[in-house]
Image (tube, grey):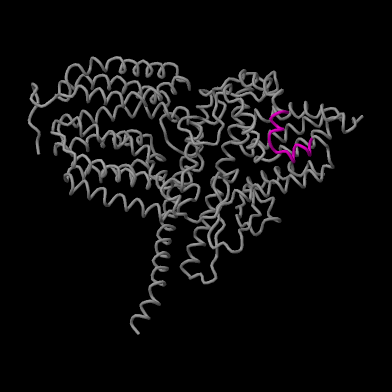
Amino acid sequence: MAASPHTLSSRLLTEMATRSSILAWRIPWMEKLGWGGGCIWYLERRVTRESPRRFLHLLRNVNQQWVTFQHFNFLRHMYVTQLNRSLKQQIKPKPEPAESPFLEKTSLDEAKAEICEMRPLVPPSLSLSRKPSEKALIEPEPTSVIEGSIDLGKETKEEKQWKEMKLRVDDLPGILARLSKIKLTALVVSTTSAGFALAPAPFDWSCFLLTFVGTGLASCAANSINQFFEVPFDSNMNRTKNRPLVRGQISPLLAVSFATCCAVPGVALLTWGVNPLTGALGLFNIFLYTCCYTPLKRVSIANTWVGAVVGAIPPVMGWTAATGSLDAGACLLGGILYSWQFPHFNALSWGLREDYSRGGYCMMSVTHPALCRRVALRHCLALLAMCVAAPALDVTTWTFPVIALPINLYISYLGFRFYRDADRKSSRKLFFCSLWHLPLLLLLMLTCKRRAGEEGTGAPQS
Amino acid sequence: MAPRRPAKRLVTALCRAFSGRGCQLAPKRGAERRDAAPSRVSRFCPPRKSRHDWIGPPDKYSNLRPIHFYIPENESPLEQKLRELRQETQEWNQQFWADQNLTFHKEKEEFVRSRLKAKGLDLRTASGQKATLNAEEMAEFYKEFLSKNFQKHMYYNRDWYKRNFAITFFMGKVALERIWNKLRPKQKKTSS
C-alpha cells in the first residue's frame, strides 16, 4: 500500500515534522544522555515498526537521518534556538554559570505545548539549511545512497572537529584570559580594591596599584592551577567544558608555567612592593585555593567553608596593604565576604546537583540539601548583623546599616524563600540577587566610610 | 539490513561496556574497531605534513576529547615515554569516565522507572513523552549515587593527580631536552 514517491512528499513533511518534533524535544536529553538517548531512539524505532507500512519507508529515511548525535546537535541549533523564548532551559552551546542541562524543573506541560508549536515550524526551518540532505528526504532516493551520504557527511563533519594542537600567538591572550578566569579575577581584585579604599589610611595610588596588580597576578596563578588539576572533571560538566585545557588549546606544562610566572612576581610584588603581611596573605590564599579547596571538593563538603575563606581573604589583603595591620575592620570586611559566599555558592550549586553527583563532587546541595539551604539563610542574616557591626568598629558611619537595610532584607527574604521552597526558581533568584548585592553593598560601605578625624577613628598605622 | 546496524551497534556497545573491556583509542585501527565500546573510535587521520598532536571532539560517552599523538621520526626515548604515558592515561581516563557516565545514566533510568512504578504512574505520560521525576525526588538518587561511588572517586583522584603531575614533569623534561639539543650544536661550534 505504499503511496507513490511524489504524493509522499507532503505526508513526508508532516511525518518528518512529527518525528523531528518528538526527537527535537528529546534532544537535550539525548545529547546529554548519549547512549541513553540511543536507547530511547532504539525503543522508539521498535515502536515505529508497529506503524502502518506506508510510513516505514519514510521513517527509515527519517531515522537514518536523525541517528547521529551530530544531527541532534544540528537539530538543537535549528529548532530549539528558534523557540528559545518558550523553552526554559538553555540549549545553546555556550558555557553557562547556573543552568542544569536537564529538564528537571521545566514543566512537561510547557514541553508538550512546545511540541505542538514546533510542528508547523519544522518544514520551513529545514529549508533554511542542510539543503543537500533535505533534498535527499523530499525526493526519496534508495536508502543505501542516503545512508552512504549520511555516513560520509558524519565522518567529514566529525573530522572537521579535530583541531591541530598548535599554539598560535594570536590566540594566546584569549586562552590565558580564560585559563586565569579573568572575570573572577576581576571580581577578586575589585573586592581587594574595596578593602584598600575602606581602610582608614590616606589613599596612596602607588601602593594601590601595586596591590591591584599583585593580587590580580596571584588570583590568575591560583585559577590556572585549579584548572590544571581539574581537566577531566571540567570536561564532564556543562559549565566548565569549554575551558582551554579541556579543549587542548594549551598544554598542562604551559598552564603550570603561566601560573608560576604569575605567582612569583605577584607574591614578590605584594611582599616587597606593599608589605610582607599582604604578601603572606596572598601566598596563603594561593595555597588554600589550589592545595586545599580544589582537592577537598572531591572529598568533603567542608570545601565550601574553605572556599568561603578563600573569597574572604582578598579584601583583607586590600586593607592590610593600606594599613599594614590586621585589625578589627579587616576582619569585619573579611567576615562580610565570607558570609556572602554561602548564599552565592549554595544557590548556584542547587541547580548543578546532577553534574556534581555524576562528577563525584562532594557538595552540600547533593549530600546535605537541608544543611545547604539552612547555611545560606544563616549567612544572609549574618550579613545583616555584620553591617550593623560596621559602624561599631569604626569602619563606616551609622548611616550605612540603615541604607543597606533594604538590600540586606531582600537577600534575607530570598534566602528564606530558598530555605522554604527548595526549588530551582528560588535558588536562581537568590544566586542572581547575590551577584548585584555584593557590589552594591561595597559601594554603600564606601560612601559611608568613616573619615579620619571623625569620632572613634584612630590614626592610620604603618 | 541497514536500519538494524545502528541498533546492533548500540547493543554490542552496551555489552562491551559492561563486560569491563578496556577501550582503545587508536584512530588508526578505525574500521575494525568500530564496535569497541564505550568510545566511538574515530577514523580520523591527521594531514601528513602536520607535526603536531590533534585533538578531537568530546567523546559521547566519556566527554573527554581524544588526542591523536604525533610521532616524530627522531623521537627520543624520553619523548616516547611521555607519549606512551599520555596515551595510556588517555585510555585510562576514557575507560573510567565512559563507565562512570554509563553507570550513572543506567542507574538514573532504573531509579526513575522504579519510582514511577511505585507511584503507579506510566513510564510515559499521556502525550507519549517520557515521564520524569521532579528535582527533589531526583536529589535522593544523586545523593545515593555520590556516596556509593565515593571510594571509587577517591582512588581515581589519587591516580589522576599522580598521572597529571608525572605527565607535566615529563613534559618539562622533554622541553628542557629539546632546548639543550638545540643549544648543544651551537656550543660545539663555538668551542671548536
Q: Residue furthest bottom?
A: B192
Q: Is residue B175 left or right of residue A150?
A: left
Answer with the quarter of the image where residue B171 lies.
bottom left
B28 lies above or below A105: below
Q: State yes or no: residue A124 in magenta.
A: yes
**Residue B34: image location, x then y, percent:** 69, 52
**Residue A220: image location, x then y, percent:** 34, 45
Q: Is residue A394 left or right of residue A131?
A: left
Q: State yes or no: residue A288 in magenta.
A: no
Q: Is residue A18 left or right of residue B71?
A: right
Q: Identify the image quadrant of the C terminus of chain A.
A: top left
Residue located at (35% from left, 77% from top): B187
B105 lies above or below A159: above
B138 lies above or below A314: above
Q: Residue furthest right?
A: A1
Magenta-drawn segment: A123-137
